[in-house]
Image (cartoon, rainbow, N blue to C red):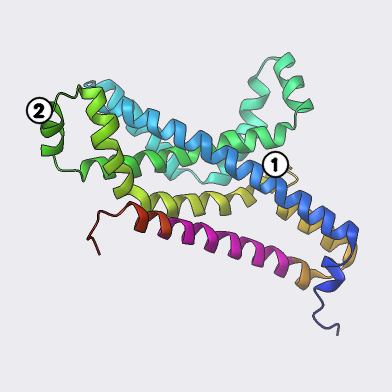
Amino acid sequence: MSSLDLSAILLKPEYSRMLLDGFEMTLVVAIGSWLLAMSLGILLLVIRLAPSRIADRAVAAYISYHQNVPTLVQLILWYFGISSLLPLGLQDWISVHNGEAIFAVIGLGLCQAAYFSEDLRSGLRSVAAGQMEAAKALGHSYVSAMRYVMMPQAVRNALPPLINHTVSLFKNSSLAVAIGVTELMHAVKEVENQSFRTFETYLIATLVYLVCSLLLMAVGAWLSRRSSPVGAT
């Protein structure tokens, strides 16, 4: 029975390089997905604020779909399904430019946008209605009031769920291995196959995800304290 020896993995240049490359791809997918999700989440919120019942129902349907269909299923649908419907020229271009990572970013970003949109909407609804009237009384237009008065408070109120869903997005990036993205879990599987040190290899992956998740939560706690009103507990 072999003893625990992380150095057998970490001190071998070929294994450590594979893990570092995989972690780098994990960051690329996670950050790209987060940027897409936050941008689309804000857009969905703006659409839902419009005085249109059709727009509101369309956004509600979008959110319902992405919250009730497993993320893994959505990734597989994008990579194996929707990609096959694209023009051949576009398919070839995507294949040359790391198509697996592109579809992972799209799938994860579109899915997480539904959660970010609801977080921001809840944060905005928690702002006192009198804030808008007060902003207009000070000469702000509707857009200006939303930008400088309402949304900053909404984001501050929504920070806890936004951070939680950011951590969830980072962890869900590991699902990208199912469509062939060479991220951390893909690298871990390759290292395990070559080293035959199953426990050590997966322990390293576990520690990486744990440390990164705890760091994200710590950053979120710091931002929450920093954005709290003076005198708030």
The residue at 25%/25% (across/down) is: 144
- Depth check: 23 or 112 in front? 23
Q: Nearer the viewer, residue 143 or 99?
A: 143
Q: Is 59 on the left-hand or right-hand side of 28?
A: left
Q: Amino acid at mark 2?
A: Ala
Residue 168 picture location, percent across and down: 50, 53
How far from the left and from the top, in percent, is residue 91? 72, 21
In the image, is residue 97 above or below residue 89? below
Reading the image, the residue beneath label 1 is 179
Q: State the quadrant of the C terminus.
A: bottom left
- Kindly indicate the quadrant of the structure image that contains residue 142: top left
Q: Secondary structure at mark 2?
A: helix
Which quadrant: the N terminus? bottom right
Q: Are marks 1 and 2 in contact (CB under 8 Å)?
A: no
Q: Amino acid at mark 1?
A: Ile
Q: Quadrant of residue 92?
A: top right
The residue indicated by pointer 2 is: 137
Can residue 13 be seen from the camera position used here? yes
Main secondary structure along the magenta-highlighted residues: helix
Q: Is residue 54 magenta?
A: no
Residue 215 position within the rendered picture, expressed as x and y whole percent measured from the top left: 54, 61
Q: Look at the image and give the residue range highlighted in magenta.
A: 202-221
Judge depth for marks 1 and 2 and give the one in front. Answer: 2
- Picture residue at 36% right of the left edge, 50% below the top: 159
Mark 1, Cα crowd under 10 Å, few <14 / some 14-19 / many 20+, is some
Above-or-below relation of 41 to 88: below
Element assignment for label 1: helix
